[in-house]
Image: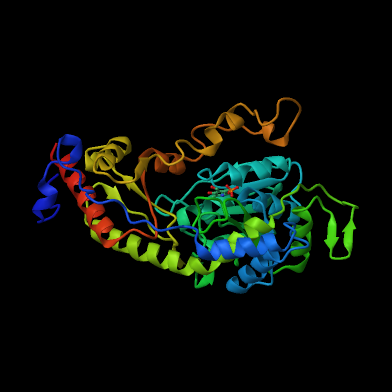
């Protein structure tokens, strides 16, 4: 195949993997994640003489700020993204034997809570370009046991929420949005997490904004909000007047502390700028790589404005002349922050599924289901061929130019081999 890569001589130089000089000549732009604002909030939290959310102000303030920012009635803070999803499943009354439809490419934090409820994760296949569950695959997987759809907005890009909302309504399913990777994303102009019955967020160290660990669930449904609060706090009913200990359902301690709340309060006003800069950088990258052969660039779901947690492209080995492992190795030699195959294998290929080893003994409904390679061919193909660039809002125009040069140079070289 003959290809015009670029008129720029710079890409015709040999790549670093073939002894050339790495395209990345300057350190990546970076900025401090936590600063004076977080320190001030932390100091104020400590001066309260309590770090317990019921008595302090920071977690309550975070909940109010987050609800306000997203235009929803309720936000309930939690100790992690995993806890958020578990609290949402509890609030939705997901029970042993229920089936929950979910993506096979996600973090175990999406999946473990399903198993802890005694419910059965049912993995549905993905769109090859947006990496999110398709309504068609979801519909095909619905059975009388299906109770919920957990829509994972991977890498900052929303699922087809119009399609999923319609399906959820038609089949009486609860639509829960896993927004752990998608802070700041919008779908049809609405903030992510506000379209399903509940939206779950993660404040872990690696997300757009962070409090080290932490999470949040948003909803407009008062009943869900009441159950969510109980679901994060052992189903104890707390108020300034005291604690009622008469739990009516099973719940863990998933409380956020005032220290996490303080940092999260200071982080929230930074989100818009973080997302805007990621959008600009990734948008420019897509424009400048659009003509390259052998690469499938990420596509935003129709109606979605992604918040770009990462930038995941796919290789077409027959066209590129290299597979994902080779391509990532060559880009890495150029000095890029890059990795191949994302999580390596679909969640259902982990031993916890193939060997049903979630618990050492006893029965669990998911043991009735066979898991293993072949369940979701498109998801497996995505992982086989994907190469992920780590993204940071502090990346500069120089980072962009060097990244483009690196990718173009490496593609040209693989093409000529
Ligand atoms: C899609 C997704 N869901 C859930 C989680 C779990 O979040 P946490 O690590 O805060 O428990 C993560 C974390 O990486 C995630 O990426």
Q: How many marks?
A: 0
Q: Residue at x 73, y 40 (%)?
A: 118
Q: Give the answer, above or below, for where 128 lies relative to 270.
A: above
Foreground of the two, 33 or 409: 33
Query: Quarter of the image holding residue 410?
Result: top left
Q: Give the answer, above or below, for where 137 lies relative to 216.
A: above
Foreground of the two, 122 or 42: 42
Q: Residue 342: horizontal and vertical position, in percent?
A: 43, 42
Q: Residue 102: horizontal and vertical position, in percent?
A: 58, 48
Query: Quarter of the image holding residue 116?
Result: top right
Q: Residue 129: horizontal and vertical position, in percent?
A: 39, 53
Q: Residue at x 56, y 61 (%)?
A: 39
Quadrant containing the N terminus is top left
Q: Residue at x 30, y 60 (%)?
A: 396
Judge whether residue 165 can be spotted in this image. no
- Specify whether 158 is left or right of 246: left
């Amino acid at each position: 195949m003959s290809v015009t890569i670029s008129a720029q001589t710079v890409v015709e130089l040999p790549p670093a993997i073939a002894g050339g000089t790495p395209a990345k000549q300057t350190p990546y732009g970076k900025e401090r994640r936590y600063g004076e604002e977080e320190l001030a909030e932390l100091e104020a939290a400590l001066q309260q003489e309590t770090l317990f959310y019921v008595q302090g102000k920071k977690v309550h303030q975070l909940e109010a700020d987050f609800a306000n920012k997203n235009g929803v009635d309720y936000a309930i803070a939690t100790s992690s993204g995993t806890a958020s999803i578990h609290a949402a499943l509890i609030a939705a009354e997901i029970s042993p034997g229920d089936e929950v439809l979910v993506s096979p490419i996600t973090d175990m934090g999406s999946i473990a809570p399903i198993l802890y409820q005694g419910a059965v994760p049912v993995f549905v296949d993905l769109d090859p370009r947006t990496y999110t569950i398709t309504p068609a695959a979801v519909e095909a997987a619905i059975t009388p046991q299906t109770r919920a759809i957990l829509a994972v907005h991977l890498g900052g890009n929303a699922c087809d929420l119009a399609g999923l909302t319609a399906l959820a309504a038609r089949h009486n399913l609860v639509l829960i949005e896993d927004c752990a990777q998608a802070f700041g994303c919008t779908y049809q102009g609405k903030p992510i997490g506000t379209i399903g019955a509940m939206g779950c967020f993660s404040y872990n160290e690696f997300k757009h904004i962070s409090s080290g660990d932490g999470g949040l669930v948003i909803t407009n449904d008062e009943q869900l909000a009441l159950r969510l609060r109980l679901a994060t706090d052992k189903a104890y009913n707390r108020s300034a007047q005291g604690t009622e200990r008469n739990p009516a359902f099973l719940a863990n301690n998933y409380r956020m502390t005032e220290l996490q709340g303080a940092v999260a309060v200071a982080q929230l006003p930074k989100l818009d700028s973080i997302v805007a800069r990621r959008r600009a950088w990734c948008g420019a990258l897509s424009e400048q790589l659009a003509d390259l052969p052998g690469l499938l660039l990420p596509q935003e779901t129709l109606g979605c404005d992604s918040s770009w947690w990462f930038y995941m492209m796919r290789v077409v080995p027959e066209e590129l002349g290299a597979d994902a492992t080779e391509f990532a190795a060559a880009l890495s030699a150029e000095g890029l922050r890059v990795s191949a195959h994302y999580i390596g294998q679909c969640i259902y290929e982990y031993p916890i599924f193939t060997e049903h080893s979630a618990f050492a003994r006893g029965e669990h409904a998911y043991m009735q289901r066979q898991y293993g390679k072949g369940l979701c061919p498109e998801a497996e193909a995505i992982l086989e061929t994907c190469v992920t660039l780590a993204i940071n809002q502090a990346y500069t125009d120089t980072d962009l130019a060097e990244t483009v040069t690196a990718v173009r140079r490496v593609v040209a070289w693989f093409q000529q081999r």
